[in-house]
Image (cartoon, rainbow, N blue to C red):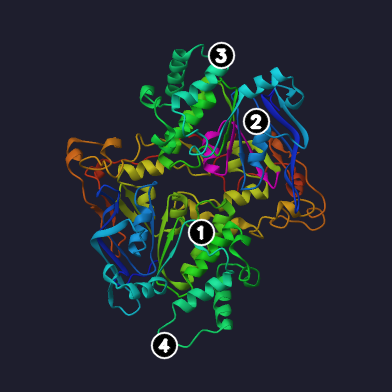
């Protein structure tokens, strides 16, 4: 828990979608928060509820139960003015820059529309200069070359930078980046991540950073926190370097044991199947009883794991893990074969 | 790991693939690629979008779309019978027979590779029937079932569950594994996989990678796989070839490429991909963006983005220069005039 009021926090937030074939508990009782200038990475496989959590944080969908708070206030009981302030302060950068920009608006219009609408720019010429300034922030220089262009004239990386510039128009306090770099080629992705990192450091923008790529989460969120999600719940939470290099939850361990590394020697240490008992993810419509991970878990214990649902438990140094077996042990295990001790 | 026989299974020489681009013009997407692939070897083609990896893969099997053509180069295949097959000169019928029986391809996007209204078992049956030897007896249903079930088990799927299903009933990882199984139906000696693990989750990707490794150990086929994921390349490849602007610019064993790359582009690419476990490395992006194929710079195609650029790089487009020669295509070669000066290091920003 940070000492300051977090910018955004989900408290016991759940979202259940109703469908003909039954209810789908996409997100179940999630507690996460991001403070000013902080980074929280949400990682997990498809369907684990990363995007649904982000949409709730952005106020794009209303939780079925639990609350979403912006600077300590429940956003769904805010006055209209407060809600507008919240909306301005939290901006969303989507995954696909080919779909998220209006194809018939040039870049200048895309960027200056919110500036003029919210009175940040008084007139068109101010709109132009402020848009140019925003493009400079996202390293699209010289801006005069880009402002009159349409999205189809830009490459994927350039479009995504425009999407970030648009998110910055209203001086947000929090940016929610939903797989914002996953469509970009590797050489361009790093430039994008470094640019986002500069925004975080220079403007003090907080980030809720969603990715399925653990390497990206580690790189961008090194000084922040990471929350690993599985079937709608957070299963492990802690400081990014610690979680990545010394995972405690068997699911986090499996992910890290499975991910191929761009290093031929390192990648030989990977375990087949990530060391799991089963490769199949249960359906959200028909979740296993007890711990939802138990049918795949290598630490499975008959009697507890398949009957009682584990809650997030605090271990040493702020790590939270939702696992009966790890919680009983009560402390963090040193990484196997670690050469240097962590801090 | 790689058994070396003297004869490569596939020899590609100066292959050019071009696409018509309207106004009677054309662009070369692959500009003179040469390599030898030896039996039971796995070669990874890595590079960014638009570097010509997929086009090369398609060109090798002559599966190019209508706008594509192969104006120059040779592709020679030496299969079971040791007779040389000139793939580019094969008549239509022989080509159809050659594909799948000798060389099969697994395409990107598993869903699009199936007929959505046929059960998996029917698609298996279609393949077996369409490719049976001329004049051989018809194949019975139970035989099709047995052969398919066998393959399903080898990709760790339950035949009773999967074979009677429609493609949409399977998950992405299962579809990808069915597709791999299907490509092996006629026991080809060469398998080309286009982005076999892209768009799969980590654990699903792991299952596909495991299956590919098992199958290769068991069935001994040569493999070319196209990927932009360097992690998968490091894991599955004996050899790695980096492509840039339609050419192979560096080739070598996986350790050559990942630990001592000699082309500045390969080095940059590797430094742009962080490993997951361990310390926090400094990542540097490669400045600029890949050149358009219709406006390639003179000289080395990488020179506008290269930090090692010299005057001679602006005029000479170097061929692959040998760095260390080894048999069976395992040599380390780089197309860079200054390869001796290229230093590859990864700076560590923070310790774990």
User: What residue does disc 2 label?
Assistant: A58
> Does A32 sit above or below residue A296?
above
At a point 75% along the width and 27% down the height, the residue shown is A76
Instruction: Please state which of residues A35 and A171 is positioned toward the viewer in this rendering.
Output: A171
Confirm whether circles 2 and 3 share one chain: yes
> Does A284 sit above or below residue A189?
below
At a point 53% along the width and 34% down the height, the residue shown is A220
User: What residue does disc 1 label?
Assistant: B112
Instruction: Please state which of residues A36 and A108 is positioned toward the viewer in this rendering.
Output: A108
Cα separation between marks 1 and 3:
48 Å
Q: Which quadrant holds residue B220?
A: bottom left
Mark linked to residue B135: 4
Cα separation between marks 2 and 3:
22 Å
The residues colored magenta run A208-232
Q: Is A316 in the magenta?
A: no
Confirm whether circles 4 and 3 share one chain: no
Kindly state the secondary structure of the residue where label 3 is placed: loop
User: What residue does disc 3 label?
Assistant: A119
> Does B86 sit above or below residue A240?
below
- Who comes first in sequence, dot 1 or dot 4? 1
């Amino acid at each position: 828990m940070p000492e300051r009021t977090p910018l955004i926090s989900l408290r016991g937030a759940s979202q259940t979608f109703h469908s003909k074939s039954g209810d789908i508990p996409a997100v179940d009782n999630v507690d996460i928060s991001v403070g000013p200038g902080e980074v929280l990475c949400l990682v997990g496989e498809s369907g684990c509820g990363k995007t649904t959590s982000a949409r709730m944080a952005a106020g794009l969908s209303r939780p079925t139960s639990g609350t979403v708070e912006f600077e300590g206030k429940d956003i769904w009981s805010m006055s209209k003015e407060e809600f507008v302030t919240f909306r301005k302060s939290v901006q969303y950068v989507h995954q696909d820059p080919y779909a998220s920009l209006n194809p018939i608006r040039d870049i200048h219009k895309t960027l200056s529309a919110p500036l003029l609408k919210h009175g940040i720019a008084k007139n068109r010429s101010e709109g132009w200069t402020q848009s140019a300034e925003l493009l400079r922030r996202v390293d699209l220089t010289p801006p005069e070359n880009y402002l009159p262009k349409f999205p189809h004239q830009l490459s994927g990386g350039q479009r995504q930078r425009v999407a970030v510039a648009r998110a910055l128009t209203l001086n947000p306090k929090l940016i929610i980046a939903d797989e914002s770099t996953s469509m970009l080629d590797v050489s361009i992705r790093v430039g994008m991540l470094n640019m986002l990192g500069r925004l975080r450091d220079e403007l003090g923008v907080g980030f809720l950073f969603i990715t399925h790529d653990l390497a990206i989460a580690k790189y961008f969120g090194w000084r922040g926190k990471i929350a690993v999600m599985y079937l709608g719940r957070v299963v492990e939470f802690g400081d990014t370097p610690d979680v990545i290099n010394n995972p405690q939850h068997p699911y986090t361990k499996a992910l890290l044991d499975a991910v191929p590394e761009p290093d031929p020697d390192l990648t030989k240490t990977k375990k087949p199947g990530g060391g799991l008992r089963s490769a199949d993810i249960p359906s959200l419509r028909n979740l296993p009883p007890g711990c939802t991970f138990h049918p795949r878990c290598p630490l499975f214990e008959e009697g507890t794991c398949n009957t009682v649902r584990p809650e997030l438990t605090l271990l040493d140094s702020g790590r939270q893990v939702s696992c009966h077996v790890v919680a009983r042990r009560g402390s963090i295990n040193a990484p196997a074969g670690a050469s240097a001790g962590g801090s | 790991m790689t058994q070396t026989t003297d004869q490569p299974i596939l020899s590609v020489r100066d292959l050019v693939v071009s696409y018509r681009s309207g106004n009677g013009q054309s662009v070369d997407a692959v500009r003179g690629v040469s390599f030898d692939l030896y039996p039971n070897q796995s070669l990874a083609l890595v590079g960014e979008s638009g570097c010509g990896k997929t086009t090369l893969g398609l060109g090798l099997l002559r599966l190019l779309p209508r706008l594509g053509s192969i104006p120059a180069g040779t592709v020679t295949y030496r299969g079971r019978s040791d007779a040389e097959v000139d793939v580019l000169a094969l008549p239509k019928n022989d080509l159809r027979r050659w594909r799948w029986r000798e060389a099969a391809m697994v395409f990107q996007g598993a869903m699009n590779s199936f007929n959505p209204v046929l059960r998996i078992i029917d698609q298996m049956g279609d393949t077996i029937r369409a490719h049976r030897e001329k004049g051989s007896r018809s194949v019975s249903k139970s035989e099709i079932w047995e052969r398919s079930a066998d393959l399903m088990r080898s990709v760790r799927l339950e035949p009773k569950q999967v074979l009677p299903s429609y493609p949409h009933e399977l998950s992405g990882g299962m579809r990808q594994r069915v597709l791999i199984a299907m490509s092996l139906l006629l026991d080809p000696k060469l398998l080309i996989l286009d982005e076999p693990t892209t768009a799969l989750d980590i654990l699903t990707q792991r299952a596909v990678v495991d299956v590919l490794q098992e199958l290769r150990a068991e069935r001994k086929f040569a493999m070319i796989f196209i990927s932009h994921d360097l992690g998968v390349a490091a894991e599955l490849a004996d050899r790695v070839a980096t492509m840039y602007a339609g050419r192979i610019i560096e080739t070598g064993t996986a350790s050559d490429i990942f630990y001592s790359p000699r082309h500045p582009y390969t080095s940059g690419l590797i430094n742009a991909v962080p490993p997951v476990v361990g310390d926090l490395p400094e990542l540097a992006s490669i400045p600029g963006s890949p050149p358009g194929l219709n406006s390639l710079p003179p000289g080395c195609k990488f020179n506008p983005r290269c930090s090692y650029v010299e005057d001679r790089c602006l005029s000479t487009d170097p061929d692959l220069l040998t760095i260390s020669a080894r048999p069976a295509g395992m040599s380390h070669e780089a197309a860079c005039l200054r390869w001796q000066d290229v230093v590859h290091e990864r700076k560590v920003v923070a310790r774990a």
